[in-house]
Amino acid sequence: MLRIRLWRGLHRVLTIYTVIIWAFEVGTLYLVTQAINLNLAIPTVIFVALAASLLTSIPITPAGLGAVELAITGLLILVSVPPDVSVSVALLYRIVSYWSLIAIGGIVFVVSKKTK
């Protein structure tokens, strides 16, 4: 019985963390669209952000590199965003959500090697 209660408590905590992480994904795309004065409906931003996040798990390329950008661009074009703006949103979003992590991770890796 104790084991079941622990699992339920852990399940609630993990669910809360998952919702927070997805909210940050959506927030990132929303802020990118606002930065270039593209006003999309919130449900559209949510759908595009979640679709992009799910595509990163398909093992075609590392973290969906290339496939995610194409998908974001295609989805935005489907909702009547001009192609040049769609490409800009896709690239800016991936710079923030993917390449910034690579850069920061590289710096941390180099610094941690020097301290050991």
Image (spheres, rainbow, N blue to C red):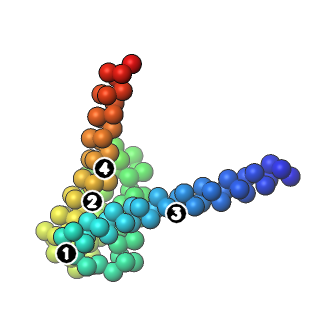
Q: Residue at x 47, y 58 (%)?
A: 21
The answer to whether residue 108 is left or right of residue 89 is: right
Please determine whether, in this image, residue 85 is positioned above or below residue 101: below
Q: Quadrant of residue 69?
A: bottom left
User: In percent of the image, x 40 and y 51: which residue is there?
Assistant: 58
The span from disc 3 to disc 2 (Cα, nearest Å) is: 20 Å
- The answer to whether mark 2 and mark 4 are in CB contact below 8 A is no
Q: Which mark is residue 37?
A: 1
Q: Nearer the viewer, mark 1 or mark 2?
A: 1
The secondary structure type at the circle numbered 4 is: helix
Marks 2/4: CA distance?
8 Å
In this figure, which residue is indicated by the disc labeled 4?
98
Give residue 9's position: percent from left, percent from top: 71, 56
Mark 1 residue element: loop
Density class for disc 4 (Cα within 10 Å; few <14, some 14-19, many ≥20) is some
- The CA span between labels 3 and 4 is 20 Å
Residue nearer the viewer, 95 or 71:
95
Mark 2 vs 4, N-terminal side: 2
Q: Is residue 107 above or below residue 19?
A: above
Q: Position of residue 18 (x, y in %)?
A: 53, 58
Dot label at residue 19: 3
Q: Secondary structure at mark 2?
A: helix
Tag shown at residue 93: 2
**Amino acid carrying mark 4 in the image:** Tyr
- Name which of mark 1 and mark 2 comes first in the sequence: 1
Residue contact at pointers 3 and 2, CB within 8 angstroms: no
Judge the density around disc 1: few (<14), some (14-19), many (≥20) Cα neighbours within 10 Å: few
